[in-house]
Amino acid sequence: MKIERARPRRVGQFLFAEIVTDGGIVGYGESGAWGHLEASEAALAKYCGYLIGKDPRTIERHWQIMHRFAHFNGAAVGGAISAVDIALWDIQAKSYGVPLYQLLGGAVRDKLRTYAHVYAKDLDGVAAYAAEKAREGYTAIGHFNPFLDEPEDNPYFLGHAGLVEMGLETVRRVRDAVGPKVDLMLELHRRLTPAEAISFAQAVEPYRPGWLEDPIRPENIDGMAEVAKKSPVPIATGERYFNIYQFKMAIERRAMSFARVSVGICGGITAALKIAAIAEANDVQVAPHNPISPIGLAACAAIGFSRANVAIQECPTGYDNYVFESTPQLLGRNVVDGDLTIEKGFLLRPEASGLGVTLRDDAEQLRPPITRAVSMRKHLDGGVVDQ
């Protein structure tokens, strides 16, 4: 078996790899570098050129070469490697006519717990949408920002006391809306300093959040470890990590209880398997991060159905065209064929071969490529704010 054609495909806010063998098997993968798709597409085109004429089944060899041939790496390159790696695994599973999780050791569960996204600009909207998702059967609400996803043109300012109180009020309202048994997965979007994160974690504990995700910027692994040490609420982080060594360091420093593995950034299925093994050996659970299309979600699901320490899966139902609004369907559902079915908050185990979803031939016509402009929210003092 040889690779005959390989190309990047830009579709809306997504970047895919399409790899075709000489026997006509087509594999799809996706880059999760959604903020820098132009750079990731350039790296992906370079890797596609390398693949022509190669055997797609030597996945580990290709993974090692892509990572190591020129020493330089990063999120855009990691996204390109991930897209290729996912597509190669898709081809491998399709060649055997089995779902991808079968090649990864077989299914450890029949269905995979998920959490719903909540996007809203005000507190009433957050509480109402969270209650709606709880009524649909979701047992966890995620992408839930206690400090709200307000418009970037709205200058930001909250003092320490005001910040903590605002976050508490949001969590209080949502807890009242969904009841005592729904887990609240708090997405802090790197908004806080370590001191603020520790204060907020201690204050919000009575509402029993499932986790605090990225309370501070995750690049500072020692800083995140200090927050985790003093927080009574579990810390989730890792979505921005683009190699296995960052996860190794964060896990060894006890900077996380939940490894937020971006299968579309970290190096694909191959890297996610390695990270899950490191996490399992350290009693850390995996919660794959996925803000991209159903192809990215299907790659995460292959890990979720084959690894016992996967706790929950993110299912994006919002942020369409980079707009902070909730939607009833999975993000990017209209550009793929094949179904990923969610019932009462659980993703059902797919039975189709490979990833179980494929990119439509007319995907670029349905969603012409768009670019995320460079911008950040301003602080009232003229500085910038992570959001």
Image: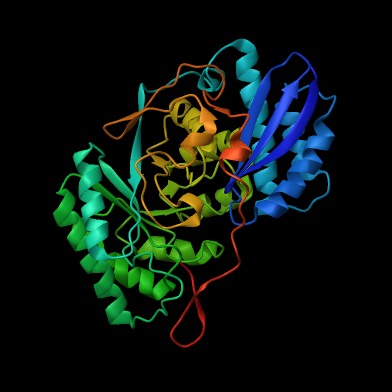
Q: Quadrant of the C terminus?
A: bottom left
Q: Is residue 88 left or right of residue 232?
A: right
Closer-to-camera residue (220/342): 342
Q: Residue at x 58, y 11 (%)?
A: 97
Q: Is residue 162 left or right of residue 12?
A: left
Q: Specify whether residue 299 is in view.
A: no
In the displayed structure, would residue 182 be above or below residue 125?
above
The percent coordinates of residue 261 (x first, y second) are: 51, 44
The percent coordinates of residue 7 (x first, y second) are: 75, 35
- Residue farthest toward the bottom in the current orientation of the protein: 381
The percent coordinates of residue 375 (x first, y second) are: 56, 70
Q: Quadrant of the N terminus?
A: top right
Q: Residue at x 79, y 27 (%)?
A: 5
Closer-to-camera residue (205/24): 24
Q: Specify whether residue 228 is in view.
A: yes
The percent coordinates of residue 299 (x first, y second) are: 53, 32
Q: Residue 16 lies in what quarter of the image?
A: top right
Q: Residue at x 83, y 36 (%)?
A: 49
Closer-to-camera residue (258/168): 168
Task: Report the label total.
Answer: 0
In the displayed structure, would residue 39 be above or below residue 158?
above
Q: Residue 364 lies in what quarter of the image?
A: top right
Q: How is the image coloured?
A: rainbow
Q: Residue at x 45, y 75 (%)?
A: 153
